Image (tube, grey):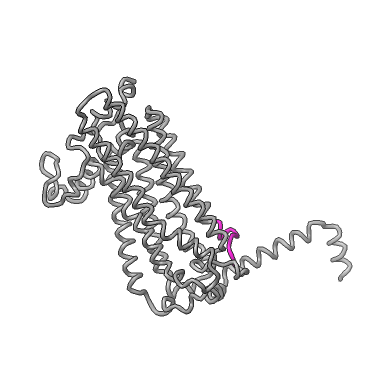
C-alpha cells in the first residue's frame, strides 16, 4: 500500500465505514437499475414459463382494464357530486370523499399496472417495478384503511352522541392523514430495502421481488384491519339495538323503528360481506404464497384474478357508502341527467329502476344539525323523527 494512503486511512477513522456504506448504496443503485434482475427473479419463481409474458395484452387483462375504467369514472362522478353540493361539505362526508378518492386512485394505478405488465414487465428495472407495485399497494391499503377510518368515526360518534362540528373536523383530518401515512409507509417499505433482491430463496411467487416476510406482514396488517372493522360495526349494531329496545319499552307499535333496525342490520351485513368476499381470497392466496415452496403451488400463478376481485371492492364501495343515501343519489342523478331522471319538483322518476328508489324511509329529510348521526346509524336514510327519539339530549344541546 502507498505510504501516503496508509497515513490518510490511519488519520481518518471513518474512512472504512463510509466506504462500506457507499459500496452498499452503489450495489443497490446498480441492482435497482438492472433489468436483468427482473428476469432472474421471474425465472426463479417459474413465472416466465407462463404465456402471460409473451405478446400483448391478454383478454383477461382487457377485462380488468374495463373494470378499472369503471372504477375511475364511478368514483370521479361521486367526488364531483360531493364537491358541487354544499350540503356535503360536512365533516362526515370528508371520510366518504377520502374513500372515494382512494378507490379512484386504486383503479388508476391498477390500470397503469396492467399496461406495464405482461411482456413489458421484463423491460422494467427493479426501481420501476417497485414503483408499479408500490402504487397499487398504497392505494389499495388507503381504501382498506379508509373503511376502518369510517368505522372508527361512526363508533366514536355513536359512543359520544354529541357530534360537534369543530371537534369532528379535526378528527376527520387526523383520520385521513393517518390513513394515508400508513398506506404510504406500507407501500414504500420494499423499495426502502424490505425486498428479496440478492436473496432469491426469500422471494414471493406472486410478487417475485417482494420478500415473503413482507407479504406476511401485509397479511397480518390487513387482517387486523378487517377484524377491527368487524368489531367496531358489531359494537355499533349493539348500541343501536340497545337504543331500539329501550325505545320499545317506552312506546308501543313501533313497527317503523323496527324496520329501521333491520335496515341497519342489512347495511352492516352488506358492508362486511362485500369487503370479506372481495378481499379474503387474496389474503388466503398471499398466505399460501408465504407457506409454499417455490414452484410448488400453481394457483399462485393466477394471482391477477384474486387481485382483480379485490379491485371490485373499489367498484362497489361508492354504491354501498354513498348511493344508498337519498341526498347523494339525487345529487348524482342531477349531475348525470337531471332532465331525464328527475321530475320538476326534484323527485326521482319511476322508470323501472328500483335501485334508484331504495330507501329505508320514504320521508327522509336532510338535517345538517344531525349530520354524522344519520350516516352513523345507517349508510341509508334515517329520518330525523326516530333520531329524536333515540337521542333527545343531542337535540336539546
The image shows residue 53, relative to residue 79, as above or below, that is: below
Task: Kindly report the secondary structure that dominates the magenta region of the rendered protein.
Answer: loop
Judge whether residue 93 is colored magenta: no
Q: Name the image quarter holding residue 29.
A: bottom right
Residue in the picture at 33% in, 44% down: 268
Judge whether residue 191 is colored magenta: yes
Is residue 289 visible in the rendered structure shown here? yes
Image coordinates for residue 31, horizontal then vertical, percent: 60, 69
Residue in the picture at 37% in, 37% down: 236
Number of numbered markers: 0
Q: Name the image quarter holding residue 175.
A: top left
Q: Name the image quarter holding residue 258.
A: top left
Q: Which residues are magenta?
A: 189-196
Residue closest to the far top? 396
Image coordinates for residue 98, horizontal then vertical, percent: 38, 46
Image coordinates for residue 1, horizontal then vertical, percent: 86, 71
Amino acid at each position: 500500500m502507498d505510504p501516503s494512503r496508509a497515513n490518510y486511512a490511519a488519520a481518518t477513522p471513518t474512512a472504512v465505514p463510509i466506504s462500506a456504506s457507499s459500496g452498499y448504496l452503489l450495489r443497490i443503485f446498480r441492482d435497482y437499475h438492472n433489468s436483468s434482475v427482473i428476469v432472474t427473479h421471474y425465472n426463479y419463481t417459474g413465472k416466465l414459463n407462463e404465456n402471460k409474458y409473451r405478446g400483448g395484452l391478454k383478454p383477461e387483462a382487457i377485462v380488468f382494464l374495463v373494470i378499472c375504467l369503471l372504477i375511475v369514472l364511478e368514483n370521479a362522478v361521486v367526488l364531483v357530486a360531493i364537491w358541487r353540493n354544499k350540503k356535503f361539505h360536512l365533516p362526515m362526508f370528508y371520510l366518504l370523499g377520502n374513500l372515494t378518492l382512494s378507490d379512484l386512485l386504486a383503479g388508476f394505478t391498477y390500470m397503469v399496472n396492467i399496461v406495464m405488465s405482461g411482456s413489458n414487465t421484463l423491460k422494467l428495472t427493479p426501481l420501476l417495478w417497485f414503483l408499479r407495485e408500490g402504487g397499487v399497494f398504497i392505494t389499495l391499503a388507503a381504501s382498506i384503511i379508509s373503511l376502518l377510518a369510517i368505522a372508527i368515526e361512526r363508533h366514536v360518534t355513536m359512543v359520544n352522541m354529541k357530534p360537534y362540528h369543530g371537534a369532528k373536523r379535526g378528527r376527520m383530518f387526523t383520520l385521513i392523514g393517518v390513513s394515508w401515512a400508513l398506506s404510504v409507509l406500507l407501500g414504500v417499505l420494499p423499495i426502502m430495502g424490505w425486498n428479496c433482491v440478492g436473496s432469491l430463496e426469500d422471494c414471493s411467487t406472486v410478487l417475485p421481488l417482494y420478500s415473503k416476510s413482507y407479504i406476511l406482514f401485509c397479511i397480518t396488517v390487513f387482517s387486523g384491519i378487517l377484524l377491527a372493522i368487524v368489531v367496531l360495526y358489531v359494537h355499533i349494531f349493539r348500541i343501536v339495538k340497545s337504543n331500539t329496545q329501550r325505545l320499545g319499552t317506552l312506546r308501543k307499535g313501533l313497527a317503523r323503528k323496527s324496520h329501521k333496525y333491520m335496515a341497519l342490520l342489512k347495511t352492516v351485513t352488506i358492508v362486511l360481506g362485500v369487503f370479506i368476499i372481495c378481499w379474503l381470497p387474496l389474503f388466503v392466496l398471499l398466505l399460501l404464497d408465504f407457506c409454499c415452496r417455490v414452484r410448488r403451488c400453481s394457483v399462485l400463478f393466477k394471482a391477477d384474478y384474486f387481485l382483480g376481485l379485490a379491485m371490485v371492492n373499489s367498484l362497489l364501495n361508492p354504491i354501498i357508502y354513498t348511493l344508498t343515501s337519498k341526498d347523494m343519489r339525487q345529487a348524482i342523478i342531477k349531475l348525470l341527467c337531471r332532465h331525464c331522471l328527475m321530475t320538476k319538483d326534484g323527485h326521482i322518476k319511476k322508470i323501472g329502476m328500483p335501485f334508484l328508489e331504495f330507501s329505508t324511509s320514504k320521508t327522509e329529510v336532510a338535517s345538517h344539525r344531525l349530520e354524522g348521526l344519520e350516516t352513523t346509524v345507517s349508510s341509508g336514510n334515517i329520518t330525523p323523527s326516530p333520531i329524536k327519539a333515540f337521542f333527545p339530549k343531542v337535540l336539546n344541546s
